[in-house]
Image (spheres, grey):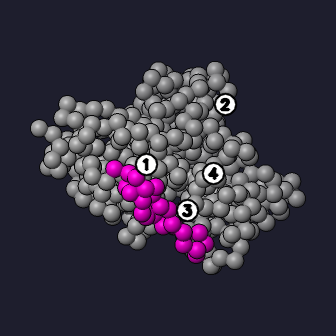
Amino acid sequence: MPGSPDHCPRPRDLRRGAALTLVFLVSVTAAAGSGCWGADAAAPQSRAARTEAGAAAAPREAGTADRDAVARAVAEAVAEGKSGKRAAEEEVSRSGDRWGAVYDPAEYAAFADDLDGHWTGVGVWAGRRRDGRIEVERVQPEGPAARAGLRAGDRLLSVDGRGVTGLSVADVVAMLRGEAGTPVVLGLSRDGADLTETVRREQLSADPVTARRLADGTTVIKVASFTRGSGDRVRDAVRAAPPGGGVLLDLRGNPGGLVTEAVTAASAFLDGGLVATYDVRGSERALYAEPGGDTARPLVALVDGGTMSAAELVTGALQDRGRAVTVGTRTFGKGTVQMPTQLPDGSVAELTVGTYRTPAGRSIDGRGITPDLTAADGAEERALGVLGGLGVGP
């Protein structure tokens, strides 16, 4: 699968106390909950190398799937004329690997385009709740779903007549995909009433990084996701900020993306040094910032419960190293490492192999990151006030 991301976790069924809504980007499927390695990552560079690297590693932790067991299940299913993908999904489910997922070749290859910020879809975010319901979490402004009248909170009942309740979000994503210009019929429930909307798929794109200048010289940098090129975009925005002006780094709702891009973004504010460590089957490795970042400019990082994975790595690095004041609400808490394994039938399993830690050694997974100052409503105003306290503004 040339061009596919080297390391890209995929969300499955999240179990985190009572708040069991798995938020997943339907239109940009690779971004949600992901911490994906680019080709230049400080990790094994090929799938073969990755597979061999873990062969003599420590015993796997509870809640992780054994890749050999998954491969055997697929081989046996194929030999019996059954679905290899389904057999793999059942094996992953039995293992308790909450972030494990299985994709067919076409689904996995499509992630490469997603990570470039371009995709074909309808432009919605969706979540899968514990009871199996699929709900629209957010609608892309001016996208086809928005023009058709879809709203956040709508329950998705069916796609082209096929019920989606109980399906994985990845399966729903695959159903919403298709050729640009083709229609997809969505069965919805809103305020207790059922309705049907026909939405035409389109080639969509998103700008992962936007920057705006405030009157007091503050630069607000919003990072929606860490797709390819986003790290350099953050660095360019910092360099273009006026001398002495502070930066508000808005990571709210950022579901993650390419880990290499997250490290580059962190490098914009650090002069080298540790960004995070991670385990791969018992072997600890490290991610380091590039030298030469702006270490003097006042910086506040704005986060919330939608700040996930790679975005949490950036938050943790800036917080632990005393580089930024963090403001907002506790982050999501997605801190596990997944790596892909190609299965005998050509499908790909993303299986959990380890965990991330911040520079101070804090585990993110299941805990998230608590900001220095808690603020929900009016969080941006609170963050700007903090920047003012750091000497920014009138």
Reading the image, the residue beneath label 1 is 265
Q: Which SS class for mark 1?
A: helix
Reading the image, the residue beneath label 4 is 39
Residue depicted at 54% across the width and 72% down the height: 284
Give the numbered dot on residue 337: 3
Of badges 2 and 4, nearer the viewer stands 4
Residue type at mark 1 is Ala
Counting residues from the start of the chain, the first of labels 4 and 3 encountered is 4
The local crowd at label 2, few if under 14, some if 14 to 19, many if 20 or more residues have their Cα within 10 Å, is some
- Distance in Å between CA atoms under marks 3 and 1: 20 Å
- Residue 34 in sight in this render: no
Reading the image, the residue beneath label 2 is 178
The image shows residue 141, relative to residue 224, as above or below, that is: above
Residue type at mark 4 is Ala
- Distance in Å between CA atoms under marks 1 and 2: 33 Å
| Range shown magenta | 270-294
Residue depicted at 67% across the width and 58% down the height: 45
Answer left or right for 153 relative to 298: right
- Distance in Å between CA atoms under marks 3 and 2: 29 Å
Coordinates of residue 75 in the picture (x, y in percent): 82, 61
The image shows residue 38, relative to residue 69, as above or below, that is: above
Residue type at mark 2 is Gly
The local crowd at label 4, few if under 14, some if 14 to 19, many if 20 or more residues have their Cα within 10 Å, is some
Counting residues from the start of the chain, the first of labels 1 and 2 encountered is 2
Counting residues from the start of the chain, the first of labels 4 and 1 encountered is 4
Q: Which SS class for mark 4?
A: loop
Callout 3–callout 1 Cβ contact below 8 Å: no
Of badges 3 and 2, nearer the viewer stands 3
- Distance in Å between CA atoms under marks 4 and 3: 16 Å
Callout 4–callout 1 Cβ contact below 8 Å: no
- Distance in Å between CA atoms under marks 4 and 1: 17 Å
Give the numbered dot on residue 164: none
